[in-house]
Image (spheres, grey):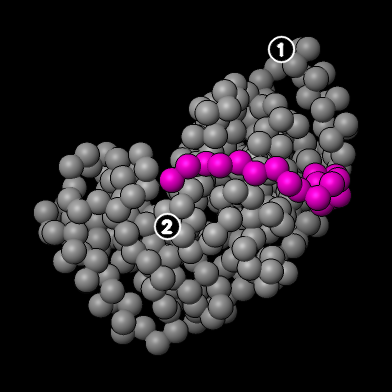
Amino acid sequence: MKVFQTIVQIREKVQSFRAQGRTIGFVPTMGALHQGHLALVQSSKQNCDITIASIFVNPTQFNNPEDLENYPRTSSSDIEKLEGVSCDFLFMPSKEEMYPHENSIKIQLGSIANQLEGKFRPGHFDGVGVVVSKLFNIVQPDQAFFGQKDLQQFFIIKKLIDEVNFPITLNMVPTVREANGLAMSSRNLRLNSDQTEDASLIYKSLLKAQKMLLSHTPILEVKAKIEELFSTQRCLELEYFEVINTDNFESVNDVVEKEKIAMCIAAEIGRVRLIDNLMLIS
């Protein structure tokens, strides 16, 4: 696997593939790779001739400086993992390469970016929108692959592609989970074994909520039950649990369009913030 660190290098390589008529799949990441990321690479390889991954810890999407400082950086093992699934190329730019000047560009992503994660992490999706736009412009892929675990991010990027007219097909890859159901996340590296086990309640709560909703339990009653489950946990604090429509990520009061309904959750354990979701119709 060839590693590129400059925009000029990766663009030259992409142009050579374009001249050959080869399709390019792109998997943008922030590193600290796990099996969920590798599933994205594998999906790209199944659908495209060439797969390019990127690793860049984007500072503009962190609203908490401590979160940025503590974000795991494991570039050596990341490269080994990508090579293990036969990723073709890795783009690993520096902050100076991506932001040579003070970043003054803002992308307004509409009300969807102000719900859930946008409400609890102000400015987060503004930073995501900018860096994803830059990466799409640099790599110019035919297809891009993102995980369902970051469901709101996926639909925001879908909106970005539609609004800006990027000629890119967006693919959602199912969430990969630990044996206990916890969604794989780079942040899981900061959990000890007890915390990892306690955090399994997040997914168990989603399954409970799904079962209740499909049994026509009122949403307010479902939310009360989830809050009750978390109230018994000493170390796991519920930040939000919402039942939303994926068209706009606004909370719903009843289940009408079942195929568009998702349950989204965020919780914190040991100063580590975890998110997860489940579509009502999986």
Mark 2 or 1: the one toward you: 2
- Does 104 sit above or below residue 190? above
Q: Quadrant of the N terminus?
A: top right
Question: Which amino acid lies under the numbered mark 2 shown in the image of this protein?
Answer: Leu
**Quadrant of the rendered image containing residue 174:** top left
Residue 6 position within the rendered picture, expressed as x and y whole percent measured from the top left:
87, 39
Q: Residue at x 24, y 66 (%)?
A: 223
Q: Is residue 62 magenta?
A: no
Q: Residue at x 58, y 55 (%)?
A: 124
Question: Which amino acid lies under the numbered mark 1 shown in the image of this protein?
Answer: Gly
Q: Main secondary structure of the magenta part?
A: loop
Which residue is denoted by mark 1 in the rendering?
21
- Does 220 sit above or below residue 79? below
Q: Residue at x 75, y 61 (%)?
A: 74
Q: Is residue 110 magenta?
A: yes
Q: Residue furthest left?
A: 216
Residue 197 position within the rendered picture, expressed as x and y whole percent measured from the top left:
45, 76
**Quadrant of the rendered image containing residue 238:** bottom left
Magenta stretch bounds:
93-112
| Residue 86 visible from this viewpoint | no
Which residue is denoted by mark 2 in the rendering?
116
Residue 63 position within the rendered picture, expressed as x and y whole percent measured from the top left:
62, 63
